[in-house]
């Protein structure tokens, strides 16, 4: 567990093993710690960043007695798992409301990768091809929901390219940090030098411009597998999954003969 602090005093704490019995209440435990962290920041009038990473709905699932009793009568396991996730997200959002800071707080709900067919029929990426671990869009596409009252319009659906790595420079810019963070870090400042791959996407989120991100690059370790650029995607290694038996195959293509797929023309089942 990573615990933050002002002035670079963050630390990583080994917060005990997580056997199946503890997993039953782990998400509730992390949610309560999140609320406590927000409370302490508000009490000290300090800006805060909280990253809550629930175990739901990652396999394997160990539900608390409250949620264990819910499946049945047309409600499947994944329905209950999503309900617990929704309940914990609601606790955080309601807490922001009760503290009177919702108007000045950006809330984002997203995921790290596409679903997997291991848990079919609860896991599926329809209408996209592929799943978690593959080079197809089913392994990449994830939901992303943002709440920023008065700044990000309600009910708007935006389909511009947005990489999860874009969140860091975007949130830094939204918090009043340097909007040229990407270039500043690349050049090096205050003793730090790095090359951030993300882009500031504030113009896209606020409706003032298009996506600043034109490419998504997939690596497996140091192995470049595919690149999506605007409406095109080039596969250098086609990594595929064969369904519930979990066989993974990888077909390497010549650097001069690769699969270039027009994304816009394949809207029904994108690659």
Image (cartoon, rainbow, N blue to C red):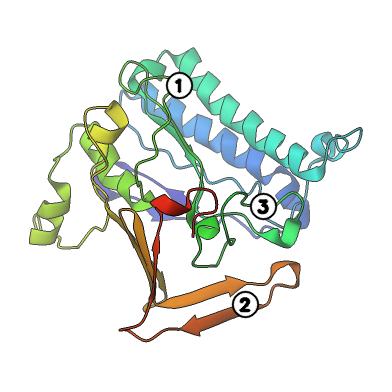
Question: Which percent across, then down, holds residue 171?
Answer: 29, 38
User: Circle 3 sits on which residue?
Assistant: 124
Q: Residue at coordinates 13% horizontally, 60% vertically from top-left?
A: 186
Q: Residue at coordinates 48% horizontally, 15% vertically from top-left?
A: 97
Among the 4 quarters of the image, the one containing residue 192: bottom left
Between residues 134 and 52, which one lies in front from this camera angle?
A: 134
Dot 3: within a 10 Å radius of its alpha carbon, few (fewer than 14), some, or many (20 or more) residues?
some
- Which is more N-terminal, label 2 or label 3? 3
Between residues 104 and 125, which one lies in front from this camera angle?
A: 125
Among the 4 quarters of the image, the one containing residue 231: bottom left
Question: Which percent across, then down, holds residue 241?
Answer: 62, 71
User: Circle 1 sits on which residue?
Assistant: 155
User: Circle 2 sits on which residue?
Assistant: 248
Q: Residue at coordinates 84% horizontally, 40% vertically from top-left?
A: 68
- Which is more N-terminal, label 1 or label 3? 3
Query: Is there CB contact under 8 Å for labels 2 and 1?
Result: no
Tell me how far mark 2 sits from mark 1, CA to CA. 38 Å
Tell me how far mark 3 sits from mark 1, CA to CA. 25 Å
């Amino acid at each position: 567990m990573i615990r933050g602090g002002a002035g670079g005093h963050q630390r990583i704490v080994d917060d005990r093993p997580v056997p199946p019995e503890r997993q039953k209440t782990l998400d509730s435990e992390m949610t309560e710690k999140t609320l406590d962290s927000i409370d302490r920041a508000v009490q000290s009038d300090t800006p805060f960043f909280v990253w809550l990473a629930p175990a739901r709905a990652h396999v394997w699932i160990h539900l608390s007695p409250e949620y264990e009793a819910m499946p049945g009568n047309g409600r499947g396991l994944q329905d209950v798992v999503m309900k617990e996730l929704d309940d914990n997200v609601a606790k955080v959002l309601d807490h922001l409301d009760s503290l009177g800071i919702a108007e000045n707080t950006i809330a984002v709900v997203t995921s790290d990768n596409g679903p997997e067919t291991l848990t079919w029929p609860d896991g599926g990426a329809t209408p996209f091809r592929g799943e978690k671990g593959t080079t197809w869009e089913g392994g990449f596409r994830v939901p992303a929901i943002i709440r920023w009252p008065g700044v990000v319009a309600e009910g708007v659906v935006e389909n511009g390219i947005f990489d999860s790595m874009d969140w860091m420079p975007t949130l830094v810019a939204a918090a009043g940090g340097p909007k040229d963070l990407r270039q500043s870090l690349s050049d090096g400042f205050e003793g730090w030098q790095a090359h951030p791959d993300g882009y500031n996407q504030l113009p896209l989120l606020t409706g003032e411009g298009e996506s600043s991100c034109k490419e998504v690059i997939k690596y497996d370790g140091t192995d470049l597998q595919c690149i999506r650029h605007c409406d095109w995607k080039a596969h250098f290694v086609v990594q595929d999954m064969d369904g519930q038996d979990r066989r993974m195959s990888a077909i390497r293509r010549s650097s001069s003969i690769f699969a270039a797929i027009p994304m816009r023309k394949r809207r029904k089942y994108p690659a």
